[in-house]
Image (cartoon, helix red, strand yellow):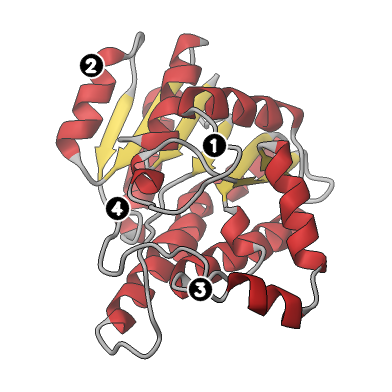
Amino acid sequence: MRVFITGASSGIGAALARHYAAQGASLGLVARRAAHLEALLASLPGPHAHYVLDVADSAALAQAAQDFVARFGLPDVVIANAGVSVGTLTEEQDDLAAFERVMRTNVLGMVATFQPFVAPMRARGAGRLVGIASVAGIRGLPGAGAYSASKAAAIAYLESLRVELHGTGVKAVTIAPGYIETPMTAVNTYPMPFMLPVDEAARRFARAIEAGVSYTVIPWQMGLVARLLRALPNAVYDRLFARAGRKPRGLAL
């Protein structure tokens, strides 16, 4: 098996890398932080490739994809996991740059990750294109306008991609995690129900990817919560969440 993963230097990406490497997969690992990525690579069994780049750089991503295919062949699974989260407020002029960065990374970075692989996977008639979204994309969270918007956009984009690929043998898989023990959640000071250890989350993600599910929330308990929240009238939702805990502004991971 060949697996290409962005955002691989920590958190969910690193856990997925460990999981697939243990299964004997050849990996293409993408991340911005060279030291973290090289430390992960040194801990993994088997030959792999790593690429230090920002997913907002579509040209660099395309070059990495080309190099991986030349060395290992077309991947069976591509996981667009790279993402940043930052507390934002629309009234703060300084936060416009944060909105732009989050959307560029979490949405356009996902598109740029998949783009080099779609046509060859379609020609082969098989493959998995996996986007890591979030339950934060199901309803807008206060103080997280950029992150919620980016994940809502990712969910809609992945659905469009799924329909475009219908009948080709290539499956677009949307995974919307709840709370996972990662550096991204470690800074949160509010309650995080149904928190999953990151390695257990990776195992569940891999099962969903293998099954080719179109959309899933992990853990399933957060899926139930998300459905309930989606069903709430706006007036009720607004009252309940107006004072919800918020991620600190200016902190991006």
Secondary structure beneath label 4:
helix
Secondary structure beneath label 1:
loop
Number of marks: 4
Marks 4 and 3 sit apart, C-alpha to C-alpha, by 34 Å
Between disc 1 and disc 4, the foreground one is: 1
Marks 2 and 4 sit apart, C-alpha to C-alpha, by 23 Å
The amino acid type found where label 3 is placed reads Pro
Q: Residue at x 33, y 40 (%)?
A: 30
Marks 3 and 2 sit apart, C-alpha to C-alpha, by 40 Å
Name the quarter where the N terminus is drawn: top right
Per the rendering, the mark at residue 195 is 1
Look at mark 3 in the image and give the residue it sits on.
Answer: 142
Q: Is residue 66 left or right of residue 223?
A: left
Between disc 2 and disc 1, the foreground one is: 1
Look at mark 4 in the image and give the residue it sits on.
Answer: 60
Of the two numbered discs 3 and 2 on the same chain, state the one appearing first in sequence: 2
Q: Is residue 96 left or right of residue 22?
A: left
Q: Residue at x 65, y 35 (%)?
A: 127
Secondary structure beneath label 3:
loop
Q: Nearer the viewer, residue 107 or 250?
A: 250
Of the two numbered discs 1 and 4 on the same chain, state the one appearing first in sequence: 4
Of the two numbered discs 2 and 1 on the same chain, state the one appearing first in sequence: 2
Between disc 2 and disc 4, the foreground one is: 2
Look at mark 2 in the image and give the residue it sits on.
Answer: 42
Q: Residues within 10 Å of mark 1 (few under 14, many from 20)?
A: some
Q: Is residue 190 left or right of residue 170?
A: left
